Image (spheres, rainbow, N blue to C red):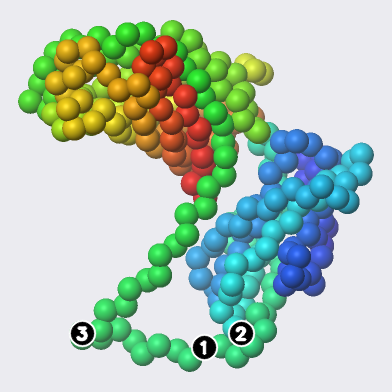
Amino acid sequence: MDFYNEGMSLRFDANGALAEDGLKVTVVPRHPGNVVVVHYRVDGGRSEMLPATAVSSPWTAESQQFCAVFPPLPPGALVEYRPVCENAGRRVPALGPADFPACFRVPGAPAPAEPPAGPNRTRVAAPEPLVTEYLMSVSAFVSKPEVFVETPEGLRVTWELVSGTFEGPRLRGVVREAVDLMTIRRDGIGVMDVQAILETHDGAFIYDTYSGIFELGEDGYENFRAGRYPKAPPARAAPKYVTVDARYTWMNRIQAVLAGQVFMDTLNFVYDAYIVK
C-alpha cells in the first residue's frame, strides 16, 4: 500500500505483516527525524501502538526503512492496522484514529470464550505493557536552594534556573526560564512543582510543567534544613508540554515521564524524558 501527504510518502506490504522479520515500512524522503509507529487493534478492541525501528538497509539516498514486529496475538484474531510516519508536525498517511486500511487474520483457531463475569466471579484484566519513546535529554543548572517558609506540609524551597539545554531526535534548544517551588516533606521527599519555558533552536516556545518526587533519604528533612545534601539524589516526574507553534503542537498531545538526578556539588539537574505511548 502507498500513501502520500505533505511531501512525504509511506509504503508497506500488507501481506507481510506476519513475516518473522516483521512488517517493513519504507518512508520517503529519508530524514533523521522520521518516526514510524504502527497503530493496531485486535478484534475491534481499543487501539494499540507499536513503535517501529529504523533498519540499516536497504536505504537509498531518498528513502529509509523501518521494521515493526507484532507481539504474540490470540489465534484466530482479526488484526487491523495502519503504519504512520511523523516528522516535525507532518504526518503520513493523513488518516483518522478509526481508520485501519490493512488487516490480517492470526493463524490458528480462536481460544474458547471465557464464561461471563458474575456475582461470584471477578475478571482481572491482564496488565498492559508500558511502551515509551525517547523524547530528549535535559541538563539544567540551578541556583542554591532557598528555604523561605516552613509549613505543616514541610519546607517550602525555591530553585531557580541559571542555564539549561535540551536535545532529542525531534527537538533541541535552551531552557529559557524555570522555577521549582518545592515542598520538602518530613519523610525526606521533595515534591517538585516546576514551571519552565523551552526555546527550540528554530524559535519555538514550549511551556513545560511537571510535578514529581526528589528523594533526599529518610533524614532528608533535617539534613536539608542544616544544609547537608546527598551527593546525587534521584528525581522522577511527569512533564506536560503546551505550545501554539504548529511545528511542535504534537507535544500538546503527549504525556511524558522523566528520570534523572541532581548533582548537588554543581547543582546540575540531568534527566532523560520519554513519551508514554
* Alpha carbon distance from label 2 to label 3: 30 Å
- 163 or 15: which is nearer to us? 163
> From the viewer's perspective, is residue 190 above or below residue 45?
above
- Residue 69, percent from left and from top: 68, 63
Q: Quadrant of residue 72?
A: bottom right
Q: Say which element carries label 3.
A: loop
> From the viewer's perspective, is residue 99 above or below residue 232?
below
Whether the residues at callouts 1 and 3 have beta carbons within 8 Å, the answer is no
Q: Quadrant of residue 128?
A: bottom left
Q: Mark 1 or mark 3: name the one nearer the start of the chain.
A: 1
Q: Say which element carries label 1.
A: loop
Q: Amino acid at mark 3?
A: Pro
Q: Say which element carries label 2.
A: loop
Residue that carries the numbered disc 1 in the rendered image: 111
State the mark number for residue 221: none
Residue that carries the numbered disc 2 in the rendered image: 76
Q: Which dot, 1 or 3, sits closer to the camera?
A: 1
- Residue 98, percent from left and from top: 59, 62
Q: Does residue 4 appear anywhere in the picture?
A: no
Residue that carries the numbered disc 3 in the rendered image: 119
> From the viewer's perspective, is residue 207 above or below residue 267?
below
* Residue at the spot 26% in from the left edge and 22% down from the top edge: 182
Report the residue that reaches farthest toward the right: 61
Whether the residues at callouts 2 and 1 have beta carbons within 8 Å, the answer is yes
- Residue 49, percent from left and from top: 58, 57
* Residue at the spot 59% in from the left edge and 83% down from the top edge: 75
Q: Amino acid at mark 1?
A: Ala
**Dot 1 alpha-carbon crowd within 10 angstroms: few under 14, some 14 to 19, many 20 or more:** few
Q: Mark 2 or mark 3: name the one nearer the start of the chain.
A: 2
**Dot 2 alpha-carbon crowd within 10 angstroms: few under 14, some 14 to 19, many 20 or more:** some
* Alpha carbon distance from label 1 to label 3: 24 Å
